[in-house]
Image (cartoon, rainbow, N blue to C red):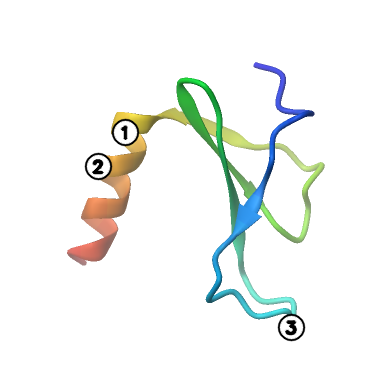
Amino acid sequence: MDVTRATWRKSSRSSGNGGACVELAGLSRVVGIRDSKDPNGGNILMSREDFRRLTETLKNL
């Protein structure tokens, strides 16, 4: 999937001090995830349902 035109966003809680942040892009049927420090280094695409399950799992850790 071509993500060159995607709008990537960082969390509003993300600081600008070079921390370990990810960026997300809501695409038509998937969510894109990439490292904010290396935006050209690749990305992960997962279904919206899988992303929802991932975030629910992380909340419960």
Residue drawn 71% across the image and 37% down it: 42
User: What percent of the width, then of the height, locates residue 39?
Assistant: 77, 48
For label 2, the SS is helix
Residue indicated by mark 1: 50
| Percent coordinates x, y for residue 7 in the rendering | 69, 41
In depth, the one of 23 and 43 nearer the eye is 23
> Which of the two residues, 58 or 27, is positioned nearer the viewer here?
27
Q: Earlier in the sequence, mark 2 or mark 3?
A: 3
Mark 3 lies on residue? 17
CA distance for labels 2 and 3? 29 Å
Disc sitting over residue 53 in the figure: 2
Quarter holding the C terminus is bottom left
Q: Residues within 10 Å of mark 2 (few under 14, many from 20)?
A: few
* Rendered position, 30 above or below 57: above
Are the residues flagged by discs 2 and 3 in contact, CB closer than 8 Å? Answer: no
Query: Which residue type does callout 1 highlight?
Result: Asp
